[in-house]
């Protein structure tokens, strides 16, 4: 009986992580919609004291990182539930690449590198700031596709859905809109 309770708790935790993934996609998309893309050096220089602009780009930085971190935690957790190797994150990524959830390990690492650059580099050159955020915008599709593939994997392989459907309709609408625009 104790083992079943532990298993149920682990499944519930994954279901909660699935909600968090959908929520991150929702807020990343909402923050991205506040900006005119691509960002330019001239725009950032002209609006260097525009609080709303810089709050939106700060939110994108934060939520992009949160989405990738949450996806990573959920993917490792799902591997454990599925009985797949998870002792190293590279094995986790390789597994999801083989399953078609992840485009490639290299694409995941590219997202991680772009995310880490902003976390450790406080750039003051507006051209570099614009380049960073334009890069995050272009890499967002990788995370969105991974989220869709991962939620499908959890549903089809593990029988686990998001714990609540608070963000499901919006998540699916965002994915569909991005597909129609040719971004996914």
Image (spheres, rainbow, N blue to C red):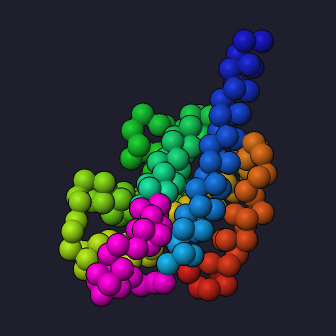
Q: Main secondary structure of the magenta part?
A: helix
Residue in the picture at 62% in, 43% down: 17
Residue in the picture at 56% in, 37% down: 77
Quick one: which residue is furthest to the top in this view? Answer: 2
Q: Where is residue 120 in the image (x, y as percent from the top left)?
A: 25, 53
Q: Is residue 48 magenta?
A: yes
Say whether residue 144 is left or right of residue 87: right
Image quarter (top left, top right, bottom left or bottom right) of the C terminus: bottom right
Could you say which is closer to the camera, residue 45 or residue 94? 45
Residue 24 appears in the figure? yes
Q: Where is residue 32 in the image (x, y as percent from the top left)?
A: 53, 72
Residue in the picture at 73% in, 27% down: 8
Q: Quadrant of residue 78?
A: top right
Image quarter (top left, top right, bottom left or bottom right) of the N terminus: top right
Q: In which quarter of the image is residue 180?
A: bottom right
Q: Where is residue 181 in the image (x, y as percent from the top left)?
A: 62, 86
Q: Is residue 80 magenta?
A: no
Q: Position of residue 52 (x, y in %)?
A: 47, 70
Could you say which is closer to the camera, residue 67 or residue 28? 28
Which stretch appears magenta?
A: 36-60
Up-down: is 16 above or below 68? above
Residue in the picture at 23% in, 58% down: 121
Could you say which is closer to the camera, residue 170 or residue 35? 35
């Amino acid at each position: 009986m104790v083992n079943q309770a532990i298993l149920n708790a682990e499944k519930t935790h994954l279901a909660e992580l699935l909600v968090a993934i959908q929520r991150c996609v929702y807020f990343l998309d909402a923050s991205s919609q506040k900006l005119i893309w691509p960002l330019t050096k001239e725009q950032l220089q002209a609006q260097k004291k525009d609080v709303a602009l810089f709050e939106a780009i700060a939110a994108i930085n934060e939520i992009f990182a949160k989405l990738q971190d949450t996806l990573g935690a959920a993917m490792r957790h799902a591997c454990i539930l599925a009985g797949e190797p998870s002792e190293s994150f590279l094995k986790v990524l390789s597994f999801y690449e083989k399953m078609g959830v992840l485009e490639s390990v290299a694409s995941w690492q590219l997202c991680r590198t772009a995310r880490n650059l902003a976390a450790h580099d406080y750039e003051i050159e507006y051209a570099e700031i614009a380049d960073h955020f334009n890069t995050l915008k272009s890499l967002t599709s990788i995370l969105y596709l991974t989220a869709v593939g991962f939620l499908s994997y959890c549903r089809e392989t593990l029988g686990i859905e998001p714990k609540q459907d608070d963000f499901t309709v919006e998540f699916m609408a965002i994915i569909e809109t991005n597909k129609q625009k040719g971004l996914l």
